[in-house]
DNA sequence: AGGAGATGGTTGGCGACGCAACGATTCTCC
DNA sequence: GGAGAATCGTTGCGTCGCCAACCATCTCCT
């Protein structure tokens, strides 16, 4: 890939249109999804995604560090995010059996219920604001491009396959919308 | 557009891959560009883009509100952002001639110099991390998709053409890399 | 064993941003 | 022309995130 892009030499005369629309789209989209989720279910987008990752994990529990990787957040960020969720009763903090240093966040029943309630809002947002705007044939191209961009940013030394971003070809949210 | 996307009815069985890679790509990319800019020029990405917008504006000055629109930031956010830049001597605050309520931010010589110094870093980042990862033929598709997403988010009632995101087909940064 | 270093998570301090409330000014319309 | 409404920007306060420092535990090497 990255076939014949002529202007590799100089950064002059680069068309910044695609770059700007990318930034723009993300800013608007993230803001909107966050607003909707907060308004309807008192959850931030981060909190929602945290609950979702927990729900998808085996045993509905995840180590703090792993959560940080998934959420692309710093360790302290995760600590505080989980603090909030614990305060709200959506998550419990348990110590890890195999490693006494470690802590795990595990979804409570209340957390799962909240997640299930919020899922329709979130999914509808993705459908209406993201997929609905993109021409059907373009979706695949966008995915390929985005995936390549993300992959290119994983520093060569690091292992960057820890994420799900690759698989998940099928419907996620299984744990979520399951029979209530 | 938005031709035959079958699963419009139910949000089930939606392929979240594209969505997740979009989020992922943005998170990594924005973080990286910000880091590079800070490390090399002590400027955040926001600050850089603020200076850039000012440099591109006629008279190198812009009203606060307009800046907020461009930067997709709240009014108070802009107030504080400009505060910082004023403290650093990169921007001056002047009162607006035609409307005594208004304030303008205008780029100082020092600000322009800083912007010019930082531009290569920023442009190289876009080139290396964004364009270099995307197949040449896909760039246009990505732009179209991103533009459509952003456009779809502009609430129907509001006028959302105030932005540059549409034009800028040619090289920007004219004011920046001009003869020193 | 046992100590050096790596690793996992939390805490303090700070920066950046949003919202709501507030003057200050301008617009609108009777 | 003047009162009320709309607009512009700033300020107080709360939230969220990062970095660096820290303590606890685990790993490995001798």
Image (cartoon, coloured by chain):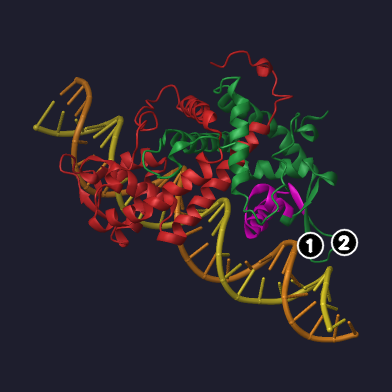
Chain colours: A green, B red, C orange, D yellow
Q: Is residue A45 covered in magenta?
A: no
Q: Chain of mark 1?
A: A
Asked if one can make out residue B137 in the rendered structure from this viewpoint, the answer is yes
The reply, left or right, for residue B60 in relation to residue B75 is left
Measured as percent of width and height from the top left, residue A13 is found at 36, 38
Q: Nearer the viewer, residue B129 or A41?
A: B129
Residue A34 vertical position relative to residue A74 in the rendered view, above or below: above
Which residue position is annotated with label 1?
A102
Which residue position is annotated with label 2?
A98
Q: Chain of mark 2?
A: A
Residue B122 vertical position relative to residue B159 in the rendered view, above or below: below
Q: Residue at image x 42%, y 49%?
A: B122
Measured as percent of width and height from the top left, residue A11 is found at 40, 44
CA distance separating discs 1 and 2: 8 Å
Q: Nearer the viewer, residue A85 or B173?
A: B173
Q: Quadrant of residue D5?
A: top left
The reply, left or right, for residue D30 in relation to residue A122 is right
Q: Is residue A86 covered in magenta?
A: yes
Which segment is the magenta one?
A66-92
Q: Quadrant of residue C5?
A: bottom right
Label annotation for residue A127:
none
Magenta: main secondary structure: helix
Q: What SS does tag 1 mark?
A: loop
Q: Residue at image x 54%, y 46%?
A: B29
Q: Are marks 1 and 2 in contact (CB under 8 Å)?
A: yes
Measured as percent of width and height from the top left, residue D26 is found at 84, 68
The crowd level at tag 1 (other Cα within 10 Å; few <14, some 14-19, many 20+) is: few
Measured as percent of width and height from the top left, residue B104 is found at 24, 46
Q: What SS does tag 2 mark?
A: loop
The crowd level at tag 2 (other Cα within 10 Å; few <14, some 14-19, many 20+) is: few
């Amino acid at each position: 890939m990255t076939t014949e892009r002529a202007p590799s030499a100089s950064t002059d005369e680069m068309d910044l249109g695609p770059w700007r629309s990318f930034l723009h789209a993300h800013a608007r989209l993230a803001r909107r999804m966050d607003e909707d989720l907060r308004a309807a279910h008192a959850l931030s987008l981060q909190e929602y995604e945290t609950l979702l990752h927990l729900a998808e994990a085996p045993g509905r529990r995840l180590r703090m560090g792993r959560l940080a990787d998934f959420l692309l957040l710093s360790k302290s960020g995760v600590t505080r995010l989980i603090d909030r969720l614990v305060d709200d009763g959506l998550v419990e903090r348990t110590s890890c059996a195999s490693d006494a240093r470690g802590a795990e966040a595990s979804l409570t029943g209340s957390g799962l219920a909240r997640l299930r309630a919020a899922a329709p809002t979130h999914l509808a947002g993705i459908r209406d604001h993201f997929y609905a705007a993109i021409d059907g044939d373009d979706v695949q191209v966008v995915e390929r491009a985005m995936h390549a961009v993300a992959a290119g940013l994983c520093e060569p030394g690091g292992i960057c396959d820890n994420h799900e971003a690759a698989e998940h070809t099928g419907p996620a949210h299984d744990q979520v919308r399951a029979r209530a």
